[in-house]
Image (tube, rainbow, N blue to C red):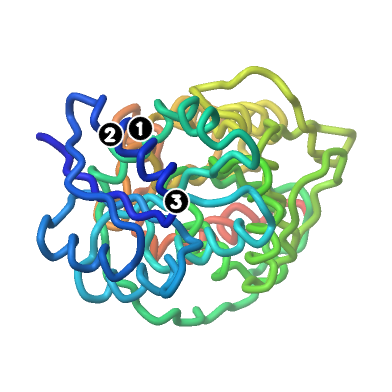
């Protein structure tokens, strides 16, 4: 199948670069290049693209407003073209809330050279978007949160995700009570975006959410997000668990890697841990979740129907790594039920 792509960007240079990248891919076709939202709206109706690349910062009507209107009128997979700034990161995360599938960060300098170097990444993002499930955005509903019957430091929850994961993690974590076990998170995201994402989660959740710095002692009611350029691992330190950040090579194609996090928890926590694998392209986390399963951890995978991209959970389920396969809507409740079951009769 040929993927029809519409490019929307106010920069003639970026439109040209993206168009050339798309033209060079044998499975893609450029169906239009729009300089603003008004031309883009016309081309969407005329060409019915499979994927749209969309700039956030545009004149007249910005990318976020265009995205919001389009996702209600004609939901289409969108890859955002973002800037590597704090303001750009915040707008990018907002675009994911509005229904964008993924994003590519523009280089701060040397745009032409930088975008050309991103050729493979951009092509992969477009292919992933073409395979994704797009849903009309719906008003956010604050979930009811009840305290869990748990008071200890020996349990750890580990969550891994990729494409579609920023919203999936938010939905799960917002159901966790303030006294939930310490939670560590690896979401495939470039450096410069994870600190902003952690702040957004912290504002929405009862748990305290922060970007991991390394060396922290894991405590109940705290959630720690892997930074965009480091692997997050858990080490045992006496009776405590502590976070270790490492700058090693990519694992399963990623840094941070879900497999690295899961494997470290398997060794340090074993049956005291709960592993959760959410939506995402590829297979990162599948092998690590299987090792957690073998070590006696409780393991969960998001079901196909609720995934934006049913890749990582699918591989894990096929490997037999999931004790439970749960919808995104029911994931938080299932995890907390497992925590209470694990805690029953255990040392507190």
List x then y, in percent, for residue 64: 44, 69
Label 2 sits on residue: 22
Q: Which residue matches tag 3?
A: 11
Earlier residue among tags 2 and 1: 2
Q: Which of marks 3 and 2 is in front?
A: 3
Q: Vertical placement of 323 versus 231: above or below?
A: below
- Image point 28% across, 70% down: which residue? 38
Q: Earlier in the sequence, mark 3 or mark 2?
A: 3
Q: Dot 1 lies on which element? A: helix
Q: Nearer the viewer, residue 25 or 250?
A: 25
Q: Which residue corresponds to mark 1? A: 124
Q: Describe residue 21's horizontal placement relative to residue 246 as left or right.
A: left
Pinpoint residue 134: horizontal percent, then vertical percent. 26, 59
What is the CA distance from the residue labelled 3 to the residue labelled 2?
Answer: 17 Å
The residue carrying pointer 2 sits among few (fewer than 14), some (14 to 19) or many (20 or more) residues within 10 Å by Cα, namely: many
Most extreme residue toward the front, as rendered?
12
In the rendered image, the vertical position of residue 24 relative to residue 324, given as above or below: above
Q: Is residue 106 left or right of 197 when viewed as pictured? A: left
User: Mark 1, residues whose alpha carbon is within 10 Å: few (<14), some, or many (≥20)?
Assistant: few
Which residue is located at x 48 percent, y 44 percent?
104
- Give SS at disc 3: loop
Q: Which of marks 3 and 1 is in front?
A: 3
Q: Badge 3: few (under 14), some or many (20 or more) residues near its Cα, within 10 Å?
A: some
Q: Quadrant of the N terminus?
A: top left
């Amino acid at each position: 199948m040929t993927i029809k792509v519409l490019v929307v960007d106010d920069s003639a240079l970026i439109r040209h670069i993206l168009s050339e990248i798309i033209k060079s891919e044998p499975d893609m076709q450029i169906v239009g290049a729009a300089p603003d939202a008004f031309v883009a709206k016309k081309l969407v109706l005329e060409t019915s693209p499979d994927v749209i690349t969309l700039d956030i910062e545009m004149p007249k009507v910005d990318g976020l407003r265009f995205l919001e209107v389009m996702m209600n009128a004609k939901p289409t997979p969108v890859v955002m073209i973002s800037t590597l700034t704090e303001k750009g990161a915040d707008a990018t995360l907002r675009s994911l809330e509005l229904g964008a599938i993924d994003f590519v960060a523009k280089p701060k300098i040397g745009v032409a050279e930088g975008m050309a170097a991103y050729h493979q990444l951009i092509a992969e993002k477009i292919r992933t978007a073409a395979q994704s499930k797009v849903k009309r955005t719906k008003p956010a509903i604050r979930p009811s949160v009840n305290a869990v019957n748990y008071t200890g430091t020996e349990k750890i929850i580990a969550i891994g995700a990729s494409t579609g994961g920023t919203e999936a993690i938010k939905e799960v974590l917002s159901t966790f009570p303030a006294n939930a076990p310490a939670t560590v998170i690896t979401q495939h995201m470039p450096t410069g975006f994870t600190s902003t994402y952690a702040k957004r989660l912290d504002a929405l959740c009862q748990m305290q959410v922060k970007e991991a710095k390394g060396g922290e002692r894991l405590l109940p009611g705290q959630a720690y997000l892997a930074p965009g350029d480091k692997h997050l691992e858990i080490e045992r330190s006496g009776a405590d668990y502590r976070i270790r950040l490492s700058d090693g090579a990519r694992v399963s194609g990623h840094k941070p890697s879900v497999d690295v996090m899961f494997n470290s928890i398997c060794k340090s926590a074993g049956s005291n841990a709960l592993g959760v694998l959410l939506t995402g392209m590829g297979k990162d986390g599948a092998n690590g979740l299987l090792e957690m399963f073998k070590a006696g951890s409780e393991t969960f995978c998001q079901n196909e129907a609720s995934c934006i991209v049913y890749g990582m959970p699918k591989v894990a389920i096929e490997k037999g790594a999931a004790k439970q396969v749960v919808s995104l809507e029911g994931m938080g409740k299932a995890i907390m039920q497992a925590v209470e079951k694990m805690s029953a009769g255990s040392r507190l």
